[in-house]
Structure formats: structure tokens, C-alpha cells
Amino acid sequence: MTHPRPDVGGPLGKMQFSDTTGAMITLGQPKDRWTMLFVYRGRHCPRCKRFLNKLNDALPAWTAKMDVVVVSADTMEKAQADRAEFGWNFDLCWGLSEAQMRALGLYVSDPLSEAETDARFAEPGAFGITPEGTLMLVDISNGPAARPDLAELLDGMTFNIDNNRPVRGTA
């Protein structure tokens, strides 16, 4: 099976997500700030919770430099339950479609059992998006064990932003 890669250096393509407050978040169009999009597996994943708790702890440093959006394929009810349980302060979105997963180049998994979850879901990913809506950085995994180090990722993104670094990996 071939796995299409996202087009770094190209436009992300417009994507809209609802967040747990009812607001609509739109990515892939011009805005005044950089955005870091994190895709998580969903409410069923304890590794995602640990990762997102770390992100929430570091959120002020992240939001000083860019917007942070987190999304899963979960239902609104599951996302709201996560927000209520963990008190996360980032934009927490739900309803990532399979077409959006594939457009981002994410790996897609079927649940191992109904106890895990009841629908296909995306494996983790992180995407740096320029203010123009260009995909600048991509980090994806095919399972829950591989995640970027948040401090290193923020440091690298800050360097890229502050020094107007070009997109890499396009040769």
C-alpha cells in the first residue's frame, strides 16, 4: 500500500473543524499567525492524554509564538468529555473526517475492538502551518508510541519563524 505524503511547501487546503465551545476553526487560509495543528487518536488513547497534558502545561510558550489547534475524529461528546476531564486550554476540535485524515497524509486505523472505539481514527500527527496557509512542517506516526518532543518542536518552530526559514524536504 502506498501512503501519500502531504505537500509540504504547498497550500494545506481549507479545513474546518468545530471546537468543543461550538466555534468553527478554519485552517488552510491566510491569517495573521502561524498555526500548529496536532492530531490525536481520540478519547480512547491514554498516550494521547499524556501528550496533550504536556502540551497544555507548555501552552503559554506555544501560544506566545503561534495558534495551537488539536483535533481528533471523535464525536463532540467525546471531545467535550476530554475537555471536562482534563481542563485543556487549547482549541480542542472534533469530527476529523477520513477524507481530511488522508489529505493530511495521516495513517488511519480501524479499532481493535468496540472497547477501544467505534470508528476509524487517525494516528498522531503534527503540522506547522504558515500564516499564508502553507504546510511548512509535517510529523506523522503510524501508532501512538512515536510523538515529537514538544520542547524540541517548539524550539525548532520558533527558529523557523524567527529566521524565516524555507520549507525543507521538497527536493
Image (cartoon, rainbow, N blue to C red):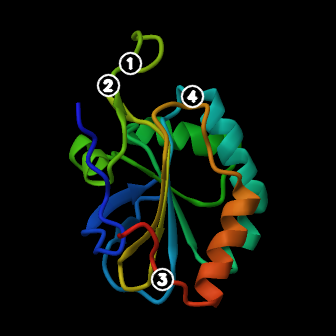
Q: Which residue is mark 2?
A: 119
- Cα gap from disc 3 to disc 2, whole angstroms: 38 Å
Q: Are marks 2 and 4 in contact (CB under 8 Å)?
A: no
Judge the density around disc 2: few (<14), some (14-19), many (≥20) Cα neighbours within 10 Å.
Answer: few
Task: Please report whichever mark, 1 or 4, sits nearer to the chain's N-terminal start.
Answer: 4
Which amino acid, by three-letter code, is at mark 3? Pro
The quadrant of the image that shows the N terminus is top left
Q: Are marks 1 and 4 in contact (CB under 8 Å)?
A: no
- Residue depth check, mark 1 versus mark 3: number of the one nearer the observer: 3
- Residue depth check, mark 3 versus mark 2: number of the one nearer the observer: 3
Mark 1 lies on a secondary structure that is loop
Front in this rendered view, residue 170 or 121? 170
Which amino acid, by three-letter code, is at mark 2? Ala
Left or right: residue 34 compared with residue 162:
left
Q: Quadrant of residue 133?
A: bottom left
Which amino acid, by three-letter code, is at mark 1? Pro
- Cα gap from disc 3 to disc 4, whole angstroms: 34 Å
Q: Position of residue 140 (x, y in %)?
A: 47, 47
Mark 3 lies on a secondary structure that is loop
Front in this rendered view, residue 111 or 16? 111
Q: Which residue is mark 4?
A: 45
Q: Which mark is residue 49?
A: none
Task: Please report whichever mark, 1 or 3, sits nearer to the chain's N-terminal start.
Answer: 1
Task: Please report whichever mark, 2 or 4, sits nearer to the chain's N-terminal start.
Answer: 4
Q: Which mark is residue 166?
A: 3
